[in-house]
């Protein structure tokens, strides 16, 4: 076999490098375009605001132009920048963007989910063969070099094994690990990116941008090691093996490495296609997502921390395939019980008990300016889907209200938020919660949501057909584990 060229990029000009797929590196190269665009946006925002005051017009054209610019820049940046842009593409409440313009940014940034610029086939082949140590022809009977999807860290190809199994092969971009490492060491870069929210609107938001940037960076860094992702996926696949509506593809270990991950090929509707399905199917898919997210956390102390719409495939029987396990968080039983206890007392309507258990578990420091009623409201008001009239429909308006009430430092629970001393282990929960609720809102999902959380908090019997099937699977799994 002829030796393939090394895929590591040669050095470029002093102070910066460019990888083989065009990923720019170096602090100045990575930060300067974002700084320039943020400054340009801020200036145009002032001009647009003055013009609208004089003419009585609106700012839609300004927001459409700005959203498109940021989507294009992030799409070419890949790495941490593009990953962060993907997160914004499905969150219902971007705090600094006026509500009437949020859909403009979601639509533009949605292009980052599956429409990233792919690397050339010869480059993908070079990475694949260097990682797995053999030619593509020896490893696979067929390999489609046109990627199924190209995202922020890698791209996915369909292939067929010599035994006839169809598989999906995720190949990491050469240079992306170094680019992300540089991004995460460049403390100004993600902070500058998050600051773009302030440049889009005159409405200012008081948040710890650098703290958020550090948290975002830690979660992104976890996704670089495909061996870690494969281990996570194997764990979830074992938990949900044979489940009636939660599917996790099996990993093909012998064809996986630190930069290549091969798994069973899952086929189904994309997120965009799912949004056009009938409401009954959307309700079933929403319950599957809810039970997977919160059931994994409640029963197994583990959850997928990346509720990205591109990570799901939807099936006509109401089941959902979950595809990406690069970012997984684990809690011990005491940590799970602490959160459950607060929500249980909140849903029972006990103000003092909610306050007591929240303080006892370290979520708030007692203060003369913080009242039990404020803590209770921060937990209860956003949870209307659980205590409101059932069945309850989750709408985009409700999701926005939920996120602002629970997580916004300038929202209705601002005083409680300022006193919140969230333990480090829980810091990704806001991302999980806001992301999942945003997805359910886009599905406009209707269900008896209270009955689902009563299963978790009160040990109640399942009321939905999917709940009964879920419990039967879990009991069978526990029985098998007990006999082992």
Image: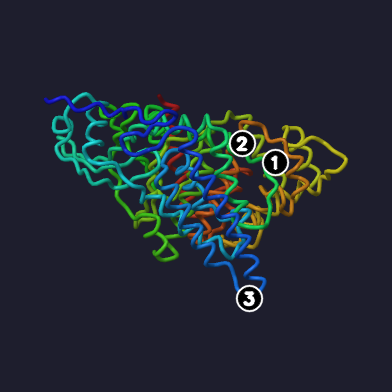
Considering the numbered disc 2 on the image, is that residue within a helix, a strand or a loop? loop
List the residue tagged with mark 3.
55
Question: In this image, 410 relative to 156: left or right?
Answer: right
Percent across and percent down for residue 243 are 39, 43
Q: Tell which circle, 3 or 1, labels the residue nearer the N-terminal end.
A: 3
Residue 396: image quadrant is bottom right
Percent across and percent down for residue 116 are 36, 48
Callouts 2 and 1 close, C-beta under 8 Å: no
Q: Residue at x 53, y 47 (%)?
A: 36
Q: Residue at x 37, y 53 (%)?
A: 314
List the residue tagged with mark 2.
427
Question: Viewer-proximal residue, 292 or 126?
Answer: 126
List the residue tagged with mark 1.
342
Q: Residue at x 39, y 51 (%)?
A: 319
Label 2, label 1: how far apart the Cα atoms are:
16 Å
Q: Residue at x 50, y 47 (%)?
A: 87
Residue found farthest to the right: 368
């Amino acid at each position: 076999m002829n030796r393939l060229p090394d895929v590591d990029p040669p050095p470029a000009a002093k102070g910066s490098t460019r990888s083989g797929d065009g990923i720019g590196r170096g602090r100045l190269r990575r930060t300067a375009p974002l700084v320039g665009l943020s400054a340009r946006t801020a200036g145009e925002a002032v001009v647009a605001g003055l013009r609208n005051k004089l003419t009585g017009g609106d700012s839609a054209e300004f927001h459409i132009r700005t959203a498109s610019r940021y989507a294009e820049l992030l799409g070419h940046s890949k790495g941490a920048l593009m990953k962060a842009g993907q997160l914004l593409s499905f969150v219902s409440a971007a705090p600094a963007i006026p509500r009437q313009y949020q859909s403009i940014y979601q639509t533009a940034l949605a292009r980052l989910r599956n429409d990233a610029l792919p690397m050339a086939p010869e480059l993908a082949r070079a990475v694949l063969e260097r990682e797995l140590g053999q030619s593509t022809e020896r490893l696979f009977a067929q390999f489609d070099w046109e990627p199924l999807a190209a995202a922020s860290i890698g791209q996915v190809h369909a292939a067929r094994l010599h035994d006839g199994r169809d598989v999906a092969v995720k190949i990491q971009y050469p240079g992306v690990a170094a680019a992300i490492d540089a991004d995460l060491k460049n403390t100004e870069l993600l902070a500058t990116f998050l600051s773009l929210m302030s440049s889009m609107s005159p409405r200012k938001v008081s948040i710890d941008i650098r703290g958020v940037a550090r948290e975002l960076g830690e979660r992104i860094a976890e996704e670089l090691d495909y061996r870690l992702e494969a281990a996570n996926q194997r764990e979830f696949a074992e938990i949900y093996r044979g489940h009636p509506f939660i599917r996790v593809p099996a990993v093909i270990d012998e064809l996986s490495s630190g930069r290549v991950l091969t798994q069973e090929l899952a086929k189904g509707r994309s997120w965009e296609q799912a949004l056009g399905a009938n409401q009954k199917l959307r309700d079933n898919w929403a319950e599957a997502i809810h039970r997977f997210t919160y059931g994994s956390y409640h029963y197994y102390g583990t959850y997928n921390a990346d509720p990205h719409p591109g990570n799901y495939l939807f099936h006509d029987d109401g089941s959902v395939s979950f595809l990406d396990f690069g970012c997984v968080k684990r809690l011990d039983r005491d940590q799970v019980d602490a959160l459950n206890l607060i929500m249980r007392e909140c849903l029972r309507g006990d103000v003092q008990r909610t306050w007591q258990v929240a303080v006892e578990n370290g979520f708030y420091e007692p203060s003369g300016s913080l009242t039990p009623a404020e803590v209770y409201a921060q937990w209860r008001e956003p949870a209307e889907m659980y205590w409101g009239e059932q069945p309850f429909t989750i709408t985009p308006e409700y999701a926005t209200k939920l996120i602002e009430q629970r997580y916004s430092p300038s929202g209705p629970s601002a005083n409680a938020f300022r006193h919140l001393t969230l333990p480090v282990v829980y810091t990704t929960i806001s991302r999980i919660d806001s992301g999942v609720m945003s997805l359910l809102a886009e599905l406009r999902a209707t269900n008896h949501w209270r009955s689902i959380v009563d299963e978790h908090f009160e040990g109640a019997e399942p009321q939905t057909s999917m709940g009964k099937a879920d419990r039967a699977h879990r009991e069978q799994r526990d029985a098998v584990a007990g006999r082992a």
